[in-house]
Image (tube, helix red, strand yellow):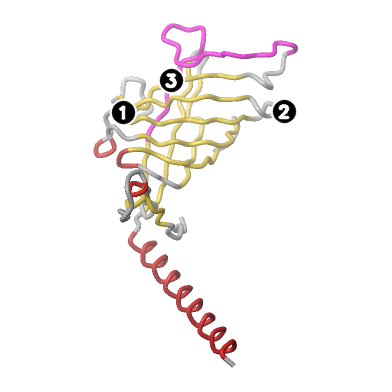
Amino acid sequence: MAAPLCSSVSVSLMLLLLVLSASASAASAADGKLIHLHFYFHEVDAGTPNATVVNVASLHKNASTFGDLNVFDNALREGADPASRLIGRAQGIGVHASLDESGGLTAIDFAFSDYGEYSGSTLATTGHFTVSAPSERSIVGGTGKLRFARGYLTSRLLSSTDTSIVVVFDIRKDSCFHMRPRRQKYPWPFDRWPMLDVSAPRAF
């Protein structure tokens, strides 16, 4: 006769834990705020003075750029004007991963050097970009004030010349995602393991 009672108690405890978990997630999401960063990416083509991008691998078997790999260290500025204030660098790689040459894959680390409270912080992003249309990519992490960031970025080509391009970026992240250190009663290194606070993503 004890078995049904134990089963009933177990079910009740599980339901209580689910309710508490949902309440905690909702409260954490409500505490979060949407952060919007807006800046301009200035790239100087390879082969020109002060180039900020180089082609490090290319098959050169035909006219296609499929498979080419570029590395870049582009300026981030507060405006579209090349003389506008420098706020950081965009460092990363771009792979021509589309057979139809319509776009590719990028992994970019945005390092902010003079961007208000985010100076000294970075954002890590990755995803597919298209040449002829706005692109959306994922934020996969960050450091400093942007530590453990999650969200997305949008970008679109603003202008292009024979030697340079300017791309406008809008980055949106939810600040409710973060890591909270939890101290345990165990010897090092166990007491330094972080606890992930899994908060519900905010609807943009």
At x 39% / y 53%, what residue is drawn?
195
Q: Secondary structure at mark 1?
A: strand
Please report whichever mark, 3 or 1, sits nearer to the chain's N-terminal start.
3
User: Mark on residue 173?
Assistant: none
Numbered disc in front, either 3 or 1:
3
Q: Secondary structure at mark 2?
A: loop
Please report whichever mark, 2 or 1, sits nearer to the chain's N-terminal start.
1
Crowding near pointer 1: few (<14 within 10 Å), some, many (20+)?
many
- The residue lying toward the viewer, choosing from 157 and 72, is 72
As drawn, 136 above or below 186: above
- The CA distance from mark 3 to mark 1 is 13 Å
- The CA distance from mark 2 to mark 1 is 35 Å
Residue 122 screen position, x and y as percent: 36, 34
As drawn, 3 above or below 104: below
Q: Is residue 190 left or right of residue 129?
A: left
Task: Give the labeled residue for mark 2.
Answer: 100
Q: Secondary structure at mark 3?
A: strand
At x 58% / y 34%, what residue is drawn?
129
Quick one: which residue is furthest to the left in this view? 116
- Is residue 45 highlighted in magenta? yes
Task: Give the labeled residue for mark 3.
Answer: 73
In the image, the segment drawn in magenta is 39-62
Numbered disc in front, either 2 or 3:
3
User: Where does the N terminus fall, quadrant-wise?
Assistant: bottom right
- The CA distance from mark 2 to mark 3 is 26 Å
Task: Give the labeled residue for mark 1.
Answer: 87
